[in-house]
Amino acid sequence: MSSLPALGSSPVPARGLPGSQFWSTRSATRDRAFRYWTDTICDELVELVISTSNRTSFEAWMLQRPLGAISLSFIHASQQTAVRTHEAICRTREPRFDLVHVRNGFVMFEHYGRNFGLRPGECVLLDSAAEYRFVSSEGSDCASLQIPQKWLRQWIPAPEKGIAQVFTKASPWGNALLATLGALNADTIEDLALPGVVVAEQVASLLALAIGKSPVPGRGKGKLLPRIRQTLMERAHDESLTPLSVAAEHGISKRYVHTLFASVGSTFSHELIAIRLERARVLLADARFANLTVSEIAWRCGFGDSSHFARRFHRAYGKSPTDYRRLHS
């Protein structure tokens, strides 16, 4: 694998990293470079209205790769100003949160009615469903994690509490979160010892700790359901997991568990199967588990019947577990 230069250095990163996508203004002529960049950001990252003070000499690149449910982007760019508009928000199909970690340079933000700046080694959580504006310094380097809102709410009942909150090394959990983000580098991202889904969950866990406790949840549907979903995430491997056992753990009736999922157009079984299938999909694509049979992977993910697992997997991903493993090995 070609080595990437340190972020902020002048050479353009090498292409061809497995599982990654790369864009650079050097792919366009000088007079088209800035337009190429704005089109790339709007198409591949987030729809923004971007301007710059040096349009004729603008340079930028972005390396992007999936990290479980999260999309991770490393970005180097000349000075730019970007605005997330109401019109762009209305065109967004799936809202998400963006965790932005500054590596080099300085970035000023306006978001959630607050004005704040990010220095190297600091990060902030943005809400793509709300308007914001930022201005970056010349040659800034950032890592941006695009996190589906629905997925993050499995980990944090009210992520909005952490929006526009600058995380620094001043707090212990903020320091842990920043250390983890800092360890995700463009030149080593393909050599992680753990699957991307595990790393994504680690980031979500540390973000939850850095944000801190929300008010103690009551028994309202909107507050209890995220806790039940978290229980499913933690115990999906348990073949004996049932609505009754989950209800007992949360001190409610089995009927109320079904009512909670019905209130959001889902079911207990649907959500549990979806979690188990996603974990199986990750293991099938991970070379470290190549020696496990499909049946063993099914068992590890909570499926007692391998035939049932195979049917469910094919229905969800359009391929049998064996074919999916062969394609992604």
Image (cartoon, rainbow, N blue to C red):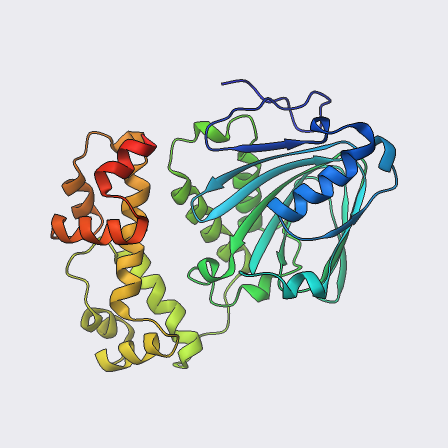
Q: Nearer the viewer, residue 228 or 289?
A: 289
Q: Nearer the viewer, residue 139 or 281?
A: 281
Residue 22, percent across and down?
A: 59, 32
Is residue 169 visible to the viewer in this orientation of the structure? no
Residue 322, percent across and down?
A: 22, 37
Residue 14, percent across and down?
A: 59, 21
At a point 54% along the width and 42% down the height, the residue shown is: 72
Q: Nearer the viewer, residue 210 or 195?
A: 195
**Residue 61: quarter of image:** top right
Instruction: Tell which residue pokes out farthest to the top in this image.
Output: 2
Is residue 93 visible to the viewer in this orientation of the structure? yes
At a point 72% along the width and 59% down the height, the residue shown is: 132
When the figure is inspected, residue 51 is found, relative to residue 271, above or below; the finding is: above
At a point 35% along the width and 65% down the height, the residue shown is: 229
At a point 55% along the width and 58% down the height, the residue shown is: 96
Judge left or right: residue 93 versus residue 272: right
Judge left or right: residue 35 versus residue 46: right
Residue 149, percent across and down?
A: 51, 60
When the figure is inspected, residue 226 is found, relative to residue 185, above or below; the finding is: below
